[in-house]
Image (cartoon, grey):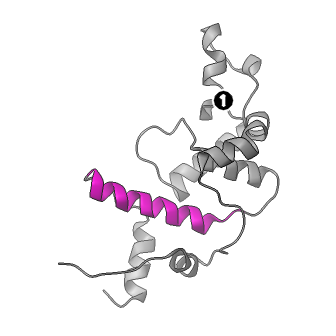
Amino acid sequence: MGIEIIITQSTITRLTGLDNSGFYEIDKDVIISNFGKDIKDTLFKKPDEVNKDDEEDKEERVDRATNMHNTEMILFKFFIQCILPRVGSTNQPRWCHRAMLLQINKGNQVNLAGDIFDHLCTCIDNSWRKHHKHVPYTRLMSELFLQSKII
């Protein structure tokens, strides 16, 4: 039952009008080894700048969104509210988003279509495996259905 539709990263690129080029990396280990120190130094406040009541917890909590510099925190919040909506906690940035924010901070182009496609695939996979009823990018899906002449 249903209609079989194949959605690729190129489909997302065509629907959104975004370039399918620029920085995009989702492997956490690759990101940590290549950009870990830059991410910590550029995006987040130093442990002594973080307001914490519990002194021994400072180092552990530095990588939270609330401890980002103001510009990066606003950009991250924009990402998770508008471009890559998240369900659940929004205070812990994923490593791929940290790397994208670092590239934006450095003035490099990022592949937003790749991240949107990856997020869409993750949501579809979660709906099958965990039976989550979350439909991301409803306007994008509507445009896909219209262009495919499904509706």
Magenta highlight range: 110-130
**Which residue is denoted by mark 1 in the rendering?**
67
The residue shown at (53%, 64%) is 116
Q: Position of residue 35 (x, y in %)?
A: 74, 44
Point out the image quarter for the N terminus.
bottom left
Secondary structure state at the residue bearing disc 1: helix
For this orientation, the residue located farthest to the left is 1
Amino acid residing under circle 1: Asn
Left or right, residue 86 beside residue 13: left
Q: Position of residue 109 (x, y in %)?
A: 75, 64
Q: Decide: is 48 above or below 94.
A: above
Left or right, residue 45 beside residue 12: right
Q: Is 123 included in the stretch rendered in magenta?
A: yes
The residue shown at (51%, 62%) is 118
The residue shown at (60%, 8%) is 54
Q: Decide: is 36 above or below 135.
A: above
Q: Position of residue 150 (x, y in %)?
A: 31, 87
Q: Is 129 included in the stretch rendered in magenta?
A: yes
Q: Decide: is 112 above or below 99.
A: below
Is residue 133 in view? no
The residue shown at (36%, 62%) is 124
Q: Position of residue 108 (x, y in %)?
A: 79, 60
- Of 98 and 135, the residue lying toward us: 98
Considering the whole magenta stretch, tell me its main secondary structure.
helix
Dot 1 surroundings within 10 Å: few (below 14), some, or many (20 or more)? Answer: many
Left or right, residue 33 beside residue 92: right
